[in-house]
Image (cartoon, grey):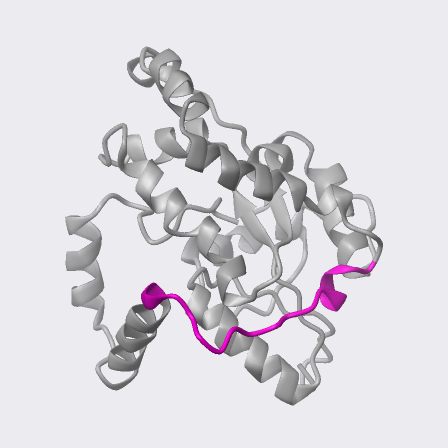
Amino acid sequence: MKQLDVDYVVDSSKDLTWHVAARRFAARSALNTANIYIWKDPLDLAYSYWKRGGGLTFWRSEFMKYYPRITPVGLPLLTVNYSALTRQPAETLADVCRALGMPYFPGKEEFWQKDQHQLFGSLGVRRQPKWSLSSLQTTSYPPEFAKHTDALRKQIAEDADLQTAIAALVASDVSKAPDGSGPQMPYSEKWVKPPWFYWQHAKLKVRRYRPQRLDDEVEEAAARPRGADGPGGGT
């Protein structure tokens, strides 16, 4: 950041144990940090997994083993709905900037129009600044999936645990956050964490000393639905 005269860094990592580690690092480094969680409406998420071969029910476990786990480890909840972002990108990004205390200007959502210093992350996102045209696309369902939507909507509406999780995400939307509140949201790390946290942390430790090779990642990707590494929107 100092070498490149960079004021803001965006980390798109989804792993919650990494978010805790990043918060610890930020505290030691005197960096202002905010966590923003992008979430898809359940029907859109169902379609996202379905088109990758995940079936019509796979999405639910992925959703429920991620978003309800954020606050139990002490991470503050600030959210963006993916559908709102694609329908109204300028307004939604303006809300994000306002909550972060970051300047907004018209067209800022067109990140592909600006040179970016990218270290890791999505190769597709990395390539987009090299293209002259790009766009944020809304979700449309093909007939093969559309015939299941009524049953899925009924299932979603009757799922009490799912509705509780959705209500928490809606209540934490950036549009409702006070100006500049994002970096000020308190992080109170829990000394005793849920069992899943320690299991995930142990897997990360193993990965540190036995990094995945590219062929390992290809084999894993072939064995699971594409995009199954996290339920959020691909931004």
How many numbered dots are placed on residues in this image? Answer: 0
- 87 over 203 or under it: above or below: above
Provide the major secondary structure of the magenta segment: loop
Q: Does residue 119 appear in the picture of this structure?
A: no
Q: Nearer the viewer, residue 3 or 84?
A: 84
Q: Nearer the viewer, residue 199 or 215?
A: 199
- 30 over 188 or under it: above or below: below
**Image quarter (top left, top right, bottom left or bottom right) of the N terminus:** bottom right
Which residue: 74% across, 73% down?
A: 7
Q: Nearer the viewer, residue 100 or 186?
A: 186
As drawn, is 30 to the left or to the right of 83? Answer: right
As drawn, is 19 to the left or to the right of 101? Answer: left
Is residue 187 rendered magenta in the image? yes
Q: Position of residue 98 (x, y in %)?
A: 81, 53
Q: Position of residue 191 (x, y in %)?
A: 49, 78
Which residue: 68% across, 38% down?
A: 89
Q: Position of residue 47 (x, y in %)?
A: 36, 29
Which residue: 70% across, 85% down?
A: 30
Q: Does residue 2 appear in the picture of this structure?
A: yes
As drawn, is 39 to the left or to the right of 1? Answer: left
Is residue 31 rendered magenta in the image? no
Asked where in the image residue 42 lies, by quadrant, the reply is top left
- 57 over 176 or under it: above or below: above
Q: Position of residue 39 (x, y in %)?
A: 52, 43
First to last magenta residue range: 180-196
Which residue: 27% across, 28% down?
A: 56
